[in-house]
Every structure is written in structure tokens, then in C-alpha cells.
Amino acid sequence: MRAKTILLLFLVPLLTACEQLGELLELPNPAKEAAKAEAEGKAIGGACRQGGRSLEDCYILNANAQKAAVYAGWREMNDYMLQNNMEVVPSQLAPAGQPAGQPTAPAAETPPVANAPEPAAEEEKRPSRRPRLPPST
């Protein structure tokens, strides 16, 4: 009986370290991976909101992130920014092919074409998607 108790006392510390053993063997842990993905999504959403990006742009730019977590992070940052009267922090990165010191110039608007038809006129010219049936008699 005494030998079993001593053996049990030596095995208890080893059994409590199962999580550390799993980490050493690099066993997958779905709960940790889900928590990490959610935290990463919240961070992405918060960064998008602080950077002035719309939620849809954030979804497009971060397609692999969980949309629910991105939304939660975006919303938390939005509430925080409204409470503390914070302004959006615009990106300081230059677009590809432009030196970092030069500010970006707004895109020039194209002048309207003289003979361009009105959008309403184009819709009238388009055939309807469904063919019209003759009236029934």
C-alpha cells in the first residue's frame, strides 16, 4: 500500500504537465488555435478601423481572417474611438512605385465625353431580360 502511495505521489506532477508535453510534441490544440484566430481577427478589425478602412475593405484585404472576429474588433475600436474622440490615423506607406517622401496626388477626374449618351438613355435601349409574352385570349 505504501509503495502505491509513493508511486502515485511521483506520478501526479508528471500527469499535471500533460499540456506542456503536448506543446513539446507539437500536438494540435483546436481550442488554442481558435482563440488565436479570434484574437488575430479582432486585432485586424481594430487596426482597420483605426486606419480608416471600411469593414468591407478589411474583409477583402484579410480574406483568411474570421469575419466575425474582424467585425468584433472593428466595432470595439469604433466604440473606443468615439468615446475618446480619436481621429483616424491615415496610412503613411507610399503606394508601390512611388518614393516614400512624396505625398500621393489625388486622381485627376476625366472630362466628360461630348457625345456620351445619358445613362437613362442606355437603359431604354437595352432589351429586357425576359421576353414579353403575348396577351392571352
Image (cartoon, grey):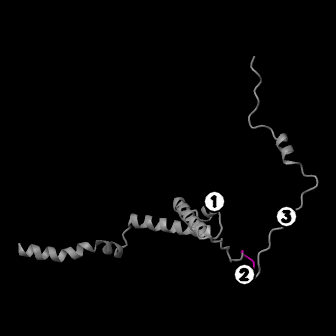
Q: Is residue 99 magenta?
A: yes
Q: Quadrant of the rendered structure where residue 57 is?
A: bottom right
Amino acid beneath label 3? Glu
- Residue 102 versus residue 130 in the image, above or below: below
CA gap, disc 2 to disc 3? 24 Å
Q: Position of residue 63 (x, y in %)?
A: 58, 62
Q: Secondary structure at mark 2?
A: loop
- Residue indicated by mark 1: 56
Task: State left or right for residue 80 relative to residue 26.
Answer: right
Disc marking residue 22 = none
- Distance in Å between CA atoms under marks 1 and 2: 27 Å
Tell me which amino acid carries mark 1.
Glu
Is residue 100 in view? Answer: yes
- Which class describes the residues within 10 Å of circle 1: few (<14), some (14-19), or many (20+)? few
| Label 2 crowd bin: few (<14), some (14–19), many (20+), radius 10 Å | few
Label of residue 100 in the image: 2
Mark toward the start of the polypeptide (2 vs 3): 2
Residue 10 left/right relative to 79: left
In the image, what residue type sits under mark 2? Answer: Ala
Q: Of label 1 and label 2, which has the lower sequence position? A: 1
The image quadrant that residue 74 belongs to is bottom right
Residue 64 appears in the picture as rendered: no
In the rendered view, would you say 6 is above or below 76?
Answer: below
- The magenta segment is 95-100
Residue at image point 60% right, 61% down: 59
Q: Which residue is mark 3?
A: 109
The local secondary structure at tag 3 comes to: loop
Residue 90's spot in the image, x, y percent? 68, 73
